[in-house]
Image: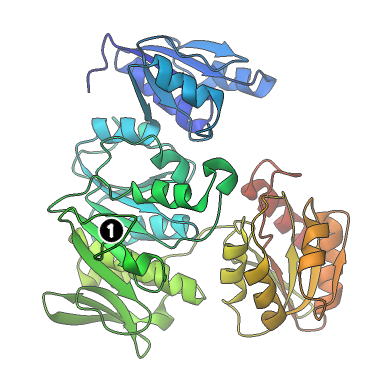
Amino acid sequence: MRIEGASFSVLGMGKSGVAAANLLARLGGDVLLSDGKDTDDLRRRAEDLVDFRVHTVFGRETVRPGDVAVLSPGIAPAAPAFRNAYRLASEVIGEVELFCRLFPGRILAVTGTDGKSTTTTLAAHLLNAAGIPAHAAGNLGNPLCDLIGVIDDNDVVVAEVSCFQLLTTVRFRPQVALVTNLAEDHLEHHGSWSAYVAAKARVIERQAHGDVFIRNLDDGFLANWLRPGDAWTRDNGQHVRDVSRSGPVADGAFLLDGGLHLARDGRETRVAERSEFPLPGAHNTENLLMALAATSALGAEPDGLIRGLTTYQGLPHRIERVRVLDGVTFFNDSKATNPHAAITALRAFDRRVVLIAGGFEKGLPLTDLAIEIERRCSALVLTGDCADRMKREFPRSVPSEIVDDLESAVIRAYELARPDGLVLFSPAASSFDHYTSFEHRGDRFREIVLGL
């Protein structure tokens, strides 16, 4: 991709937009960086982070005619700026696409509804433990473009890619790709379930002979990808490796009798016991199996994988154990921004919990979560913008109450869980009613719990 002397309009001053603008300017591009907002925070970010050769515009998203437009993943397809970019620009791409055109090395791409970050960081950890230099980046919060010029071309980049980022990919072709699972999410951005799935499917759209797709057979929808008659994806000649918690697969990774196995070319290798991996829950078994299958496809040997899986510590805000107080154990799962993620968290425990839920109203169905709550919760404490709806739709057989804020929710959940219960903060909703991000929300939960 020619950058020196070419013109680029970068839309959005988030982390990925700033990283893309800095990289393009550093490589000799003429860069205009704009944002639809004009805030003190954005102006400080521009002063501190943007290369001095980048021109900035605040208060409107601007595309110069004929430029290559680099779109922020937060710009929805129905937004005027999205349409305007396609009308005026010579080409429309995103930061992921820009990175893949400039990085000649191997990419392992991870997408899905839940479990992306854990699988991404775990895969990078396993590769490094096996002696294969790897870097986790992307939707995690550290932009891919920041890696250009810093890492070696022979390193592996494990890229977490969201459905938003995939919408602006054109030639993106990861050597290994996986989709953790699929459930309804971000429908307000994509407009429909079909559009959401189609966006996820772009992760393997350009794959071809020599590439690998890791297929999760434990997800009923994904189990049929790349099978005859599949409406979402087509067989492009890539190699498919399956993972399953339910027993052997011909090629891939599986769980059998408590053991983690790799299968390749008719041979099976028992890598380790599931009990050696520190993260709880069936969903983390799936994350681990996918990471094992993906990293072995990149050449990681069993000895290195064993070292990696026993030393991985997990990520904050994902069923993170915060403390035990007077016999009550608190878990922070602020990353659960949709009902599917909260269901996954509830299933990680073998006893009933006091659940704290609620947040920004995304309009997602609550039926399946309600069923799981009836099976697994002793009480509910609800807060946030969607608390009223949750109280109406969650089962009356489980005692529930609405409180004003997160601090009140923690205190009340603690009272309900005594003397030896478990409090799970798994909101099943976004954080944007009162917080800037799920990390901000999770940090506040942890602060409150540690201050009890």
Residue 80 % position (x, y) = 55, 23
Q: Is residue 143 left or right of residue 329?
A: left
Residue 251 appears in the picture as rendered: yes
Query: Tag 1: Cα neighbours inside 10 Å, few (<14), some, or many (≥20)?
Result: many
Position of the N terminus, as image quadrant, is top left
* Residue located 77% across and 54% down the image: 386
User: Which of the pair 218/271 is nearer the observer?
Assistant: 218
Residue 303 % position (x, y) = 23, 72
Q: Secondary structure at mark 1?
A: helix
Q: Amino acid at mark 1?
A: Leu
Q: Quadrant of residue 447?
A: bottom right
Q: Quadrant of residue 269?
A: bottom left
Which residue is identified by label 1? 127
Could you tell me how many numbered marks the image carries? Answer: 1
* Residue located 36% across and 13% down the image: 67
* Residue located 44% across and 63% down the image: 181
* Residue located 43% across and 27% down the image: 19
Position of the C terminus, as image quadrant, is bottom right
Residue 31 % position (x, y) = 40, 13
Residue 276 % position (x, y) = 40, 79
Q: Is residue 357 left or right of residue 6?
A: right
Residue 308 appears in the picture as rendered: no
Is the residue 72 above or below the residue 191 in the image? above
Q: Residue furthest bottom?
A: 257
Q: Quadrant of residue 337?
A: bottom right
